[in-house]
Amino acid sequence: MKKYFFIIFILPIAYISAEVKLEDCASIKSDVKRLACYDYLITGESKSSDELSKQTIQNSDVKSPVTISEEEANFGLSNKQKKEADIKVIKSQLVSMISETSKTFGGKTRFKLANNQLWESQSVLSTIKLNNFRVKNNIVIEEANMGGFWMINKSSNVKIKVKRIS
């Protein structure tokens, strides 16, 4: 009985007095520093963020066939995502071409652009509007006044409300 009493009351006290807790790691904004915190909790060894960032760069074998500017890559991110990544994007429009389209189960249309960004219509499009947004059409994506984005066909000036998926 004394053993159970010891386990029930002493182990939680040891957990409470731990140096770093999961909640502490979860509250860290930087991906590299958060990973280092979790690694420290599991292994007990602390790596510097320089070592971790070098390691993640070496391990990433993802290669994109299309090179795009940093401004283009960050275009369409929400204000929350920009704030978390500490990104200051001045560019208010993106010019591209539709490389492929697809329908979702809900009837919305997804557009993959030439720069590999994926955008989705905010509502189900009528056939007339959808005909203005076909593959190889040149488009402009602009920020809307009250948030969100407009996809505008350059030749016909037809616009639809869209959001960035990836």
Image: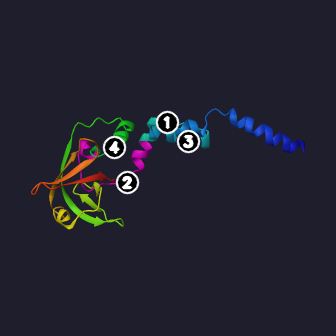
* Label 2, label 3: how far apart the Cα atoms are: 23 Å
**Measured Cα–Cα span from mark 4 to mark 3:** 27 Å
Dot 4 and dot 2 residues touching (CB under 8 Å)? no
Q: Which residues are magenta?
A: 54-73
Residue at point 42%, 40% (across, down): 53
Q: Which residue is mark 4?
A: 78
* Disc nearest the viewer among 2 and 1: 1
Classify 10 Å Cα crowding around label 2: few (below 14), some (14-19), many (20 and above): few
Q: Amino acid at mark 3?
A: Tyr
Q: CA distance from mark 1 to mark 4?
A: 20 Å
Q: Residue at x 23, y 44 (%)?
A: 144
Label 1, on which residue? Answer: 28
Q: Position of residue 130 (x, y in %)?
A: 20, 64
State the residue in front, 125 or 140. Answer: 125
Mark toward the start of the polypeptide (2 vs 3): 3
Residue that protrudes farthest toward the left in the picture: 155
